[in-house]
Amino acid sequence: MVKRIAIELIGKYTRSFNTDFDHNKKFLTELNIGVSKKMRNKVAGYATRVVRSDLMAIEVEGEVEPDSI
């Protein structure tokens, strides 16, 4: 449930989430999605993890150069 909610919200509000947990938590509070405090924190934590992993993947892609044949 946490993953589903986080991925739906990241898809809907792509630019609003970043790698800062507190920022994501405040953003979810502003959205007022109607979940408990514990669930909000779990969603914010998972969203933070997803955004960080996406940024890491983009950085790694940029560093790897294709081999010339």
Image (cartoon, helix red, strand yellow):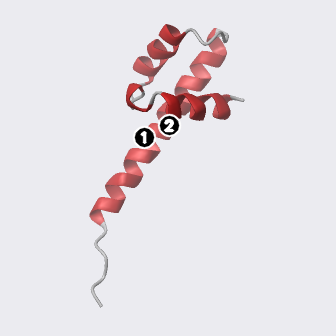
Give how far across and how far down residue 51 sits, in percent. Answer: 45, 38
Q: Residues within 10 Å of mark 1 (few under 14, many from 20)?
A: some
Q: Amino acid at mark 1?
A: Arg
Q: Nearer the viewer, residue 9 or 67?
A: 9
Q: Relative to 59, say whether 1 is above or below.
A: above
Q: Which mark is residue 49?
A: 2
Q: Residues within 10 Å of mark 2 (few under 14, many from 20)?
A: some
| 61 left or right, relative to 27 | left
- Residue projecting furthest to the front: 12
Which residue is at 56% across, 8% downward? Answer: 32
Give how far across and how far down residue 26 sits, in percent. Answer: 45, 12
Label 2, secondary structure: give it. helix
| 13 left or right, relative to 43 | left
Callouts 1 and 2 close, C-beta under 8 Å: yes
| 67 left or right, relative to 40 | left
Which residue is at 66% across, 33% downward? Answer: 4
Q: Relative to 1, say whether 29 is above or below.
A: above
Q: Amino acid at mark 2?
A: Arg
Mark 1 — residue?
52
